[in-house]
Image (cartoon, grey):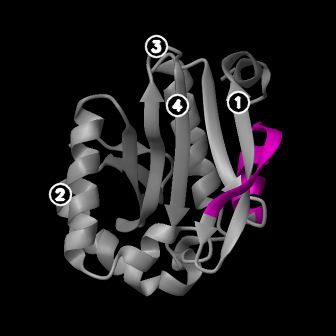
Amino acid sequence: MYTYVIDDKIELRPLTVFHTEPLYRLIQDSRHHLRDFLIFVEYTTKEDHTRKFVEETVVTNAKLESFVSVIYVDDCVAGLVGFNSIDHQNKRAEMGYWLGEPYTGKGVMTKAAKAMVAYGFKTLGLNRIDLKAAATNHKSRNIAKRLGFTEEGIIREAEWMHDRYLDHVHCGLLKRDYEKSEWGAL
């Protein structure tokens, strides 16, 4: 299995069906933390729900329609990062990510997302990476800012979450801006 080592604690591994149980357990253990911004948490009440997602994503990864990886911290499943959809014709992808609660606030997601952005531009040949975050999801928006994404606009009432609509902030990063950044030139 291919593993991308980020540092002595963090690595990315390809998503496989063997990740079903640890991902399900992580979602359950982090349910309160994740539910404010990820509606799938409400509908993940059985391991089979996670299995269905994993199996579908493994297929879309194999077809190169997505590229989702598992984040490991100290050899434990910590979350997911990747491109939920890839538009090869327009050389564009939409990025998504989440971490279990025990792994937040330690720079893990910034490092994992940074590695994914580099992979997108350098290996997949993307020209643009999009990211959407709830306007009130300041942690996710701050990660995007640290990676050089530009907040390009607000999509009002973009998502129904539990009992209200959330506005989404649409962020984008262009390859040319990435290449000019301090870490994109590496």
Name the disc covering residue 173, or none. 1
**Residue at 48 percent of width and 55 percent of height:** 8
Q: Earlier in the sequence, mark 1 or mark 3?
A: 3
Q: Determine the image quadrant of residue 68.
A: top left
- Residue type indicated by callout 4: Ala
Residue range highlighted in magenta: 138-159
Residue 105 position within the rendered picture, expressed as x and y whole percent measured from the top left: 67, 70
**How far apart are the two marked residues, 3 and 2, measured between alpha carbons?**
29 Å
Disc number lying in front (2 or 4):
4
Q: Earlier in the sequence, mark 2 or mark 4?
A: 2
**Residue at 52 percent of width and 66 percent of height:** 99
**Alpha-carbon neighbours of circle 4 within 10 Å: few (<14), some, or many (≥20)?**
many
Q: Which residue is mark 2?
A: 17
**Residue at 54 percent of width and 20 percent of height:** 126
Residue 15 position within the rendered picture, expressed as x and y whole percent measured from the top left: 28, 50
Horizontal side, residue 180 vs residue 13: left or right: right
Whether the residues at callouts 1 and 2 have beta carbons within 8 Å, the answer is: no
Q: Earlier in the sequence, mark 3 or mark 2?
A: 2
- Is 153 included in the stretch rendered in magenta? yes
Disc number lying in front (3 or 2):
3
- Is 175 included in the stretch rendered in magenta? no
**How far apart are the two marked residues, 3 and 4, measured between alpha carbons?**
11 Å
- Residue type indicated by callout 1: Leu
Whether the residues at callouts 1 and 4 have beta carbons within 8 Å, the answer is: no
Whether the residues at callouts 3 and 2 have beta carbons within 8 Å, the answer is: no
Q: Earlier in the sequence, mark 1 or mark 4?
A: 4
Name the disc covering residue 43, or none. none
Name the disc covering residue 93, or none. 4
Label 4 residue SS: strand
**Alpha-carbon neighbours of circle 2 within 10 Å: few (<14), some, or many (≥20)?**
some
**How far apart are the two marked residues, 2 and 4, measured between alpha carbons?**
23 Å
Q: Determine the image quadrant of residue 142.
A: bottom right
